[in-house]
């Protein structure tokens, strides 16, 4: 998945961080910030690390807050139009300028537009219809809670041109450090020879063992099954959240809530708790809850034969009840 960097002072960003971010997420590079009273953005498809360095030279001395996005394609084509940030509202149509960046496996949205990313679809079918009528929802705690609940462990970074404020959805699912917030750290620690240590500002060039994670199984991920329905509640002019919540997202909200719950470190869980989760969801659980994962593996490794059969029976029963498959 991708990486969002929200910096309070762009001039303090480390080149090693940007280098690692590019090598691990090389499908697009974009940024957004407020200057001259309006939101400024850029989107590029760098082919080399040198392209990133050359582009960043234009902004590296700016002592202002800035959002950066390094893309790792999961949905839609790898092209400039699918790079972040995305325009939610604009001055001409809405008398308000708001842009957004996203990080996560897939947002809960119908995938209607061909070859477009889930972020594009989510902005078009979900965010824009809501915020166009009331942009101040961005600062409403209940609205933000609703968005957090619906997107699970995914993260969103908004920039509002009316006041220059950044708003983070699911901030606690990222990593906050000195004057900077990262939407995750696993996307700069894939074990492919460019792992970044945020504490020491160093890059490890030694690749780790190849796994399904760092081999890039995220590419083409489409864990949520959304299909177009001619009776869909979505169109360009009207949005019915209640209908969407009960229809398009009903089967996914429970899974997303469960993933979020399991991501709390030290939360104990067993194999049956993972039934129905996608590979990306399970990766989130392992990353955010290392202690719970360690306890689970320890219990499995040291279980006696009877306990192992009991665990297997429980797993089979849960899969049967939830309709899980061996690919979940």
Image (cartoon, rainbow, N blue to C red):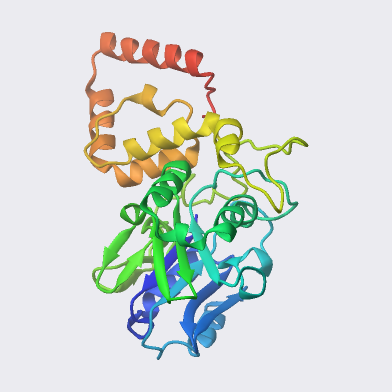
Asked if residue 47 can be seen in this view, the reply is no
Q: In which quarter of the image is residue 6?
A: bottom left
Q: Is residue 29 visible?
A: yes
Position of 85 compared to 195: left or right?
A: right
The image shows residue 109 at horizontal and vertical percentages of: 60, 45
Foreground residue among 304 and 32: 32
In the displayed structure, would residue 49 be above or below residue 26?
below
Name the residue: 71% across, 48% down. Answer: 235
Q: Which of 123 and 61 is in front in this view?
A: 123
Q: Where is residue 114 in the image (x, y as percent from the top left)?
A: 75, 51
Residue 135, percent across and down?
51, 62
Q: Residue 167 lies in what quarter of the image? A: bottom left
Q: 244 or 276, which lies in front?
A: 244
Q: Is residue 146 above or below residue 192?
A: above
x 54%, y 18%: residue? 323
Total numbered labels placed on residues in the image: 0
Q: 136 and 309: which one is in front?
A: 136
Name the residue: 51% across, 75% down: 31
- In the picture as drawn, the residue positioned furthest to the right comes out as 230
């Amino acid at each position: 998945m991708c990486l969002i960097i929200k910096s309070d002072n762009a001039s303090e960003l480390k080149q090693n961080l940007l280098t690692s971010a590019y090598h691990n997420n090389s499908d697009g590079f974009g940024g957004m910030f407020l200057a001259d009273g309006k939101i400024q953005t850029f989107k590029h498809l760098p082919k080399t690390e040198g392209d990133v360095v050359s582009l960043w030279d234009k902004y590296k001395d700016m002592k202002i807050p800035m959002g950066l996005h390094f893309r790792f394609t999961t949905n839609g084509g790898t092209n400039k139009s699918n790079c972040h940030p995305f325009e939610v509202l604009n001055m001409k149509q809405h008398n308000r300028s708001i842009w957004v960046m996203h990080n996560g496996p897939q947002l809960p949205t119908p995938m209607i537009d061909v070859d477009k990313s889930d972020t594009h679809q989510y902005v078009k079918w979900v965010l824009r219809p809501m915020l166009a009528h009331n942009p101040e929802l961005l600062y409403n705690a209940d609205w933000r809670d609703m968005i957090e609940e619906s997107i699970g462990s995914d993260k969103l970074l908004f920039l509002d041109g009316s006041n220059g404020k950044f708003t983070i959805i699911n901030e606690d699912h990222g990593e906050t450090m000195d004057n900077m917030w990262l939407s995750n750290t696993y996307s700069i620690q894939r074990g492919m020879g460019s792992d970044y240590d945020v504490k020491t500002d160093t890059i490890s060039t030694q690749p780790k063992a190849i796994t399904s994670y760092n081999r890039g199984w995220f590419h083409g991920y489409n864990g949520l099954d959304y299909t177009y329905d001619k009776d869909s509640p979505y169109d360009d002019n009207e949005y019915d959240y209640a209908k969407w919540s009960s229809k398009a997202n009903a089967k996914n909200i429970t899974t997303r809530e469960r993933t979020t719950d399991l991501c709390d470190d030290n939360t104990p869980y067993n194999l049956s708790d993972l039934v129905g989760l996608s590979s990306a969801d399970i990766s989130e659980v392992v990353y955010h809850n290392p202690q719970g994962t360690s306890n689970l593996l320890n219990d499995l490794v040291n279980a006696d034969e009877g306990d192992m059969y009991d665990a297997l029976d429980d797993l089979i029963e849960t899969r049967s009840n939830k309709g899980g498959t061996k690919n979940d």
